[in-house]
Image: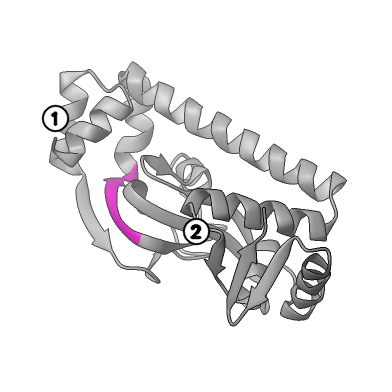
Amino acid sequence: MDILQQFFKHLHIHEEALQKEITKYATITSHKKGEHLIVLHEYIKVLKIVLKGKVRVYQESEDREILIYYLNTMETCTLSLSACFDDCKSTVNAIVEEESLVLNIPVRYVNDWCYRYKSWNTFTIKTFRDSYLILMDSYSKLAFKTLKERILDYLLAEANEQNHCTLTMSHQQIANEFGTTREVVSRLLKKLEKENLIHLGQKSVQVIR
């Protein structure tokens, strides 16, 4: 099935007129790992929807980064979507984590389609709602769990997603997920290792189940 047809099916876009407009005005681009899709403080000119792949959305301050959320197949950045309605600058960066295909829709159509097409309005509302739930979950973890517990949860989730107990990642990469320093992460990982919850290797972490 054509990737656009998969997109229409996933979002339940049944209006033929909207399908034609998306086909006419949107473009599809491919991106390699490490490419920036969204840059902090730049105006949002197009709404980017991940058709295939994985994108990391994060904020940075001085020499630290903190993860906001990941975009997976058929997802878009809520913060970028909101910028489409107000012609404002991006408050986040987005970088490709896995080779990705991206649908690019000029912002001038995004707002208009919400009024004209029910399916697009539904997609917009669902995107805001899902992101709100993700952010609330992150806030709850931040408020009620220690950093050590959050790091262990993160490692377990990554192991489940990759279907592999040994994760190839540096202490700095983990630190970037939580907006902290490599030294703090290294100390907490050693504590988890002493508790026989993980095993540390050279730029790798093995989750013990």
Magenta part, dominant SS: strand
12 lies left or right of 131: left
Magenta-span inclusion, residue 114: no
As drawn, the label of residue 56 is 2
Q: Is residue 91 above or below residue 181?
A: above
* Picture coordinates of residue 58, whole percent (x, y): 57, 60
Magenta-span inclusion, residue 103: yes
Of residues 144 and 197, the one drawn nearer to the viewer in this rendering: 197
Residue at the location (77% across, 69% down)?
193
Magenta region, residue range: 99-107
* Picture coordinates of residue 60, whole percent (x, y): 63, 68
- Quadrant of res 139: top right
Looking at the rendered structure, the secondary structure element under dot 2 is strand
Question: Mark 1 highlights which residue?
Answer: 20
Query: Hey, what amino acid is under mark 1?
Result: Lys
Q: Is residue 73 above or below residue 120?
A: below
- Residue 46 visible from this viewpoint: no
Residue at the location (49% across, 26% down)?
125
Instruction: Point out the frontmost of discs 1 and 2.
Output: 2
Residue at the location (79% across, 74% down)?
190
* Picture coordinates of residue 102, whole percent (x, y): 29, 51
